Image (cartoon, rainbow, N blue to C red):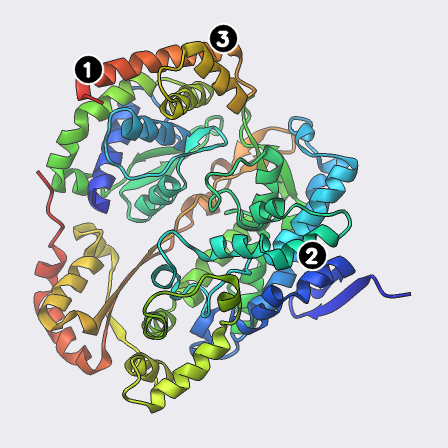
Amino acid sequence: MKRLQRAATLVSLVESLRENGSWCGETSIQKASFFLQELTGVPLGFEFVLYKYGPYSFDLTDELTALRADSILTLETPDPKYGPSYLPGKMSGFVLERFPKTVNRHKAQVDFVAERLGRKGVAELERLATALYVQLGSTGRSSLKSRAGNLTRLKPHISKADAEQAAREVDKMRAEAKQLFGQ
Amino acid sequence: MAKNIHEIRDAVHVFARLDSDERKILDSRAFQRLRHIHQLALTYLVYPGATHRRFEHSLGVMELAERVFRIITADENLDDRVREVVPSGDQLAYWRRVLRMAALCHDLGHLPFSHAAEKKLLPEGRTHESLTVDLVNSDEMERIWSKVTPPLRSEDIAKLAVGPKELKHHDFSEWERILAEVIVGDSFGVDRMDYLLRDSLHAGVVYGKFDQYRLIDTLRILPETDEESAAPVLGIESGGLESAEGLLLARYFMYSQVYLHHVRRACDFHSQDFLLSMYPDRLPTNIDDFLALTDNEVLVELRRAVADSSHPGHDAADRIVNRRQFRVLYERNPQDAEKNPEAGEAVYYAACEKFGKQNFRHDRYSQGGSATDFPVKTRDGRIVPSLAVSDVLKKLPLVNVDLVFVAPELRDQAQKWLSENRDEIISQVAEDEP
């Protein structure tokens, strides 16, 4: 994906997340992009590693700042309680209009992810994204309990019950994504 | 009795102090090599005073790392919400030592002319940071780490020296992540603090100055947000907010005025071409060959190449030495950016097609990271995002460069062509794919 095509996809993701009730801070975009790339197969080209709040891409952070520099995205802080929030910038319309095929090709995947993650808080996003990270790294048919165990080992502050719930929810999302997108 | 603490005069911090164990690192081949790597590559062709080296910068980074460490680990400065992340006793002493060594070693892997040619000269997937890690883990350095008191683990030093962004697949504990942030952090890394102050001093500009004393005194380890699951990171007490703004403004101005100066950037392209002519099969990355290579060897070869028209690097060398560097043909402005955010790329490709690729270079740089976003502790103990309490940070511009350079002998012709076709060229946006 070329830079402006990826920009159009990220703008589309930000719009969809906001429509689905997301505050759209960087953590929301990071986790949604991780699901978009790894669960639904949209080739954003970011490398995700396990970091402070689960899977995280340093390249994506750089890209979000670069998109702000080009006014494709903008950052506002309407409520200090929740931290900064991303919005489409004044050049967002430009990329959406110039890359309609790219946006349409990934629209269903973008909405799928945004509908499922939009209303989640940071702590829940961390659990779900880390559960997916664990699942992607699991070999063969590892059980839900074993994956939940791995999740709590990676993130000791997550309880066993929350880890199992997250693993269950990711299993469900993965099955849906497979049916809808063949991933 | 032999002296254990050594003072070295420093242009920025007055003294850099180190003990006899740290002196062994100073005297190592890898560190002494930094005496011969210019901090700012060929920037001295624009700012003649900017001839300082990575040697003194590395000492300065260690000096600042020590000051930050003392402040953020002082008992009276620890926030109860994150207090448990900081070790105590011998462990704290061990990590202080690791931090100082990592600060000293953080630039060991720099190539000649620093960043100018790194991407093209190193094998795929290698960076100066990965070379730094190799050097820290080398047998020669390992012998030093094992003999200092207490012995230090080279992998701990490497982690703090380059940070999690460069060692993506290594596990970092919260404490290790914070210490790496002390050195290479986007907001408050002492690497950046030192280079802004030092580069500003030597270049003879005031843009890089900020109130380092107030800033460091108010740095704290804080939860990133008020949420219970928030990770501990480096933040600031509200009384230091203006000094943090000063640091980030200094960064913006130094990038705009010094690091991305158009003549320096043009010379970076030529030095890259020259180095590629010296090393068409890429730079050696084995330790002995790498350590033998500094700016000195390259500068000697550069002068040889100028005098020899058959030298493969003659043209690049001649452009640098005889001031025939490429000139700016196009600089994107806000009006053009509204027509095409990649306007420079459109001009570059059209110009290459019209006049030949060898006559043009495209320079695109966008600021990355998220330096302006950090936690601030208010007087009543709440944690608020910096962007919620600082109008300066909200409005701080992002560095964004989009330039096209042309060979000076073609400049008039290319400018005429561009002025006649500008709107049409800039409107050419890459095609959407089916």
Is label 3 in a helix, a strand or a loop? helix
> Which chain's residue wears label 1?
A
Quarter that holds the N terminus of chain B: bottom right
Residue positioned 49% across, 44% down in the render = B167
Whether residue B242 can be seen here: no
Q: Going from the N terminus, do you reach mark 1 or mark 3 first? A: 3
Residue A174 lies left or right of residue B89; in this view the side is left
> Which chain's residue wears label 2?
B
State the image quarter where residue B416 is shown: bottom left
Whether residue B309 can be seen here: yes
Residue B190 lies left or right of residue B402; in this view the side is right
Q: Mark 3 points at which residue?
A: A161
Q: Position of residue B345 (x, y in %)?
A: 20, 58
- Vertical side of B37 occupied by A90: above or below: above
Is label 2 in a helix, a strand or a loop? helix
> Which chain's residue wears label 3?
A
CA distance for labels 3 and 2: 48 Å
Q: Which residue type does callout 2 highlight?
A: Ile
Who is closer to the viewer here, A36 or A81? A36
Who is closer to the viewer here, B202 or B1? B1
What is the total number of numbered labels drawn onto the structure image? 3
Q: Position of residue B347 (x, y in %)?
A: 16, 62
Residue positioned 42% across, 49% down in the render = B396
Q: Which residue type does callout 1 highlight?
A: Gln
Residue A39 lies left or right of residue B358; in this view the side is right
Quarter that holds the C terminus of chain B: top left
Residue positioned 23% across, 77% down in the render = B407
Q: Residue A179 carries which label?
A: 1
CA distance for labels 2 and 1: 58 Å
Q: Mark 2 points at which residue?
A: B144
Who is closer to the viewer here, B319 or B97? B97
